Amino acid sequence: MLPPMHRLWLFALAPLTGCLDTPEEPVLCTDLYPSECAQQAECTILSGYSVSTVEGCVDFTGGGVGSGCDSNERVCLDQETLAAPPEDPSDCFLFTDSCVPTDWVSCEDVSDIPPAC
């Protein structure tokens, strides 16, 4: 057996691995673009359907538009919701539940759920 001083010296030279590794930072889904969101297992893309203020209807053709990202753990109500990006409140989208992208606002020109086009 080595004297205590030699054991300490061997420990200092040993590579640091295992329990001393730093854990990965958790992914904050709300900070991701939809394209980045799709690559994260713990995140889900928030998709909305474009509302035509000219025709007064919702365009369900072609599927929803990826508008944001959120955690898979977020609880959404089963309630259609209208929302718009903060930089253009007149660009209204219909979401099929209560989950909308972070910082989105109420639609400027639409207050009731319009019919399908």
Image (tube, rainbow, N blue to C red):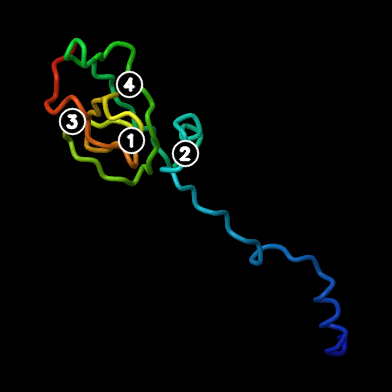
Q: Is residue 94 above or below residue 41?
A: above
Please, what secondary structure does the residue beneath circle 3 have? loop
Viewport quadrant of the C terminus: top left
- Rendered-image quadrant of the N terminus: bottom right
Which numbered disc covers residue 50? none
- Residue shown at 36%/22% (left/top)? 65
The residue labelled by disc 3 is 80
Q: Say which amino acid is labelled 1.
A: Pro
Image spot of residue 96 (x, y percent):
22, 28
Q: Nearer the viewer, mark 1 or mark 3?
A: 1
Hey, what amino acid is under mark 2? Leu
According to the image, label 2 marks what residue?
32
Q: Residues within 10 Å of mark 3 (few under 14, many from 20)?
A: few
Q: Are marks 4 and 1 in contact (CB under 8 Å)?
A: no
For disc 1, the marked residue is 86
Residue 87 spot, x, y in % from top left = 36, 32
Which residue lies under the disc numbered 4? 64
Q: Amino acid at mark 3?
A: Glu
